[in-house]
Amino acid sequence: LLEHLLLFRNLVICGECGKIMTPNKRIRESGNITYHFSCNKRENRTMCKNRNISDSKLNNIVTSVLKEIIDKFADEEIIVNEVSNNKIKNSQYERKINNLKMDIEVHNNNVRKLYLKKTTNEITLEEFMKQKKIEDKMKELKEEELKRLCRERDLQYQKEDILKKYQQFIQEDNLLKNTLKDLVEHIIVFKNNVIQIKFKFSCIEDVKIKLY
């Protein structure tokens, strides 16, 4: 198969049945050879009714979409600065997360000590319940903050990964070869002439395109 057909392998999905669409060769009366992606699913001896899409049309659409995304990050200096800033932010997140984990462990130790004091009658049950409630509340607040920071850190890592991909693209010329598999999760083809491009990163919105 042609190189760009191999790049799209397992990425093109039928929007009607969910089956992977496969490239097929067509020899026209003129002798010209063309390729198109189609769904080969059969059910009750009936082929899937979804449309086909030519490899050239698919190639042009996806390349155009990826170029639009790349253009938003086309300034290499900005990209380098963004990557550097994200590394700093990630380092700050990791430090805060580690501090919170240590604080939570301190609360766990405090509760264990309270149990020990209660069993040795160093404190009353009432005092134990009162202090444990305080420790549990403080621990709960820090656990919520930890979850929030972990979510923000993960988004920062996603952004950094994308910026690195853009930076690689600027240094390379072949857009599809260098970025398609890294950025695109699936390309879904619907029989109502709509294509949806789903990306691997949540910070890039999926794209829907109407074919004419």
Image (spheres, rainbow, N blue to C red):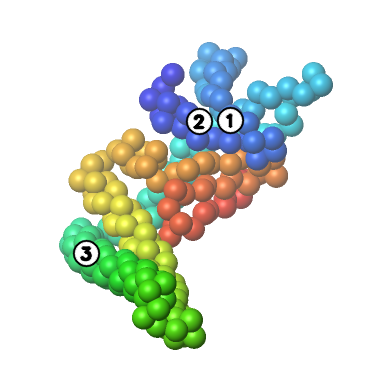
Looking at the image, tell me whether mark 2 or mark 3 is earlier in sequence order.
2
Q: Is residue 134 visible?
A: no
Question: Is residue 6 at least partly visible in the picture?
Answer: yes
**CA gap, disc 2 and disc 1:** 6 Å
Q: Residue furthest front?
A: 121
Q: Nearer the viewer, residue 175 or 164?
A: 164
Q: Residue at x 46, y 57 (%)?
A: 202
Residue 94: percent from the left, percent from the top? Answer: 26, 64
Image quarter of the N terminus: top left
Looking at the rendered structure, which numbered label has been put on residue 92?
A: none
User: Height in image: 66 above or below 127?
Assistant: above
Q: Which mark is residue 10?
A: 2
Q: Which residue is mark 3?
A: 91
Which x, y percent locates residue 60? 46, 41
Mark 1 against mark 3, which lies toward the viewer?
3
> How far across and how far down the image is residue 63, in percent?
41, 44
